[in-house]
Image (cartoon, grey):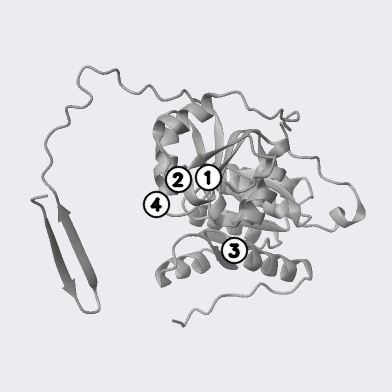
Amino acid sequence: MGGRITLQSEPGKGSTFEVAVPLPPSQASAGQTAFPGVDLTGKSMLLVADGIEASLIARRLERWGGQICVVADAAVAEALLPERSWHAVLIDRAVGPAIADRLGEAARAHALQRLVLLTSSSRHEKLSPAFTGFLVKPLRAASLAARLALTPEVASPELAPEPPAESADPASAKGLSILVAEDNEINALLMRSLLTKLGHRVVIAVHGEAALESWLAATSAGTPYDLVLMDIQMPQLDGIEATKRIRAHEAALGGHTPILALTANTLMEDRYACFEAGMNGFLIKPLDREKLEEALAGLAASKPLAVPNMTGT
C-alpha cells in the first residue's frame, strides 16, 4: 500500500507504534447526499459495552444529539435502569448471554428500545423476547440509525418516569442520611441508585455551594446528615474548600459530620489535601460498590472510618 510502520521502544517506559498509509481523496461520495443519521436530541441512551467499539458507538450517538451513558459492568447498568426513562438500551452480548438476557428483561419497564449487539457468529442464536431488535458488530452507522428510528416491534409496557418511592418500613428507617456532592449527572445517578438500594436516604448537590447550603440547612433544622460524600473537583466551590467551610462551622456550632472524598486522583499530595481539609477518608472513582458498602457498614455500626495508609505504596 506504499505505507510504513515505525516503532520507538525504550525498556521500562513503553513503545510507540506509528502506521502511515497514503490514501487518495475519496471520490465515492461525489454528488451523493450525505448520510442524514437520526435525530436523538435530548434522548437518553444506556450502552452496556466495553472497549474501543463502545467508545465509537457512544461518539456516534452523541453526534446525533443523544445523551449517552456507557457502562461496562452489568450490575451498575441494572442499578441505573430505574433512574430514568431511556429511549434505548443497547447491550453487548459479550457481557455474557445470560447476563444480556437478564438486562434485557430488566429494561422492559424503562426503555422504549432494547437492542442487543451480536457478532456475526451469534446472530442465529435464540434471543430473549425482551429485545426489540439486534445489531451485528461491527456496527454500521446506517444500520444503527435505522434501528433507532424504528417503532419497536415488541410492545413495551408503560415507562416508569420516576424511581420508586422510598420504603417507609423499619429497615429503611435504619439507613443513613447521606449528602452526595457530585456535579457529574451520571455519577450522581449511579451513587443515588446504589445508596438507595442499600437502604440509605440520599440528597444530591450539584456543586460545592449547594452542598454547603444543604448541610447548613439540615444542621439548623436539627436533622444533620450522617455522612457527606464530597467530590473534589466541582464548579463554583470545590470539595476541599466546601469541607473546610463545613469544619469551620462545626468548630463554632459543635458536632462532626463524617466526610469522604470522591476522587479519581490517587496521588499522595491529593490524599494529604483531603485530610488537611478535614475529611475522614476517600473513595476512588469509579466507585467500587464493595468499598462503599464497607465504609457505610462501619459508619452505621458507629465504628471509626478507616483511613487509608498514608505511608504507602
Q: Secondary structure at mark 3?
A: loop
Mark 2 touches mark 4? (CB < 8 Å): no
Q: Amino acid at mark 1?
A: Leu
User: 10 Å neighbourhood of mark 1: few (<14), some, or many (≥20)?
Assistant: many
Marks 3 and 4, Cα distance to the nearest angstrom?
A: 22 Å
Task: Using the image, tell me which numbered label, if any, was put on residue 117.
Answer: 1
- Are the residues at dot 3 and dot 4 in contact (C-beta closer than 8 Å)? no
Q: How far separated are the C-alphas under marks 4 and 1?
A: 14 Å
In the figure, residue 283 lies in which quadrant? bottom right
Cα separation, mark 1 vs mark 2, equals 6 Å
The residue to which callout 2 is attached is 137
Q: Are marks 4 and 1 in contact (CB under 8 Å)?
A: no
Q: Depth-wise, is mark 4 or mark 1 nearer the camera?
A: 1
Q: Secondary structure at mark 2?
A: loop
Please tell me which of labels 3 and 4 falls first in the chain: 4
Eyeballing the image, is 256 above or below 21? below
Select label 1 or label 3 by which is in front.
Answer: 1
Labels 2 and 3: the sequence-earlier one: 2
Q: Secondary structure at mark 4?
A: helix
Task: Left or right? Give the position of 185 relative to 265.
Answer: right
What amino acid type should be assigned to the residue bearing mark 3? Answer: Asp
Identify which amino acid the numbered label 4 is placed on: Ile
Mark 1 in CB contact with mark 2 (< 8 angstroms)? yes
The first of marks 4 and 1 along the sequence is: 4
Q: Mark 2 to mark 4: distance in Å?
A: 12 Å
Residue 158 visible? The answer is yes
Q: Which mark is residue 52?
A: 4
Percent position (x, y) of residue 172?
Answer: 85, 53
- The residue closer to the viewer here, 185 or 94, is 94
Which of the two discs, 2 and 4, sits closer to the camera? 2
Q: Which mark is residue 288?
A: 3
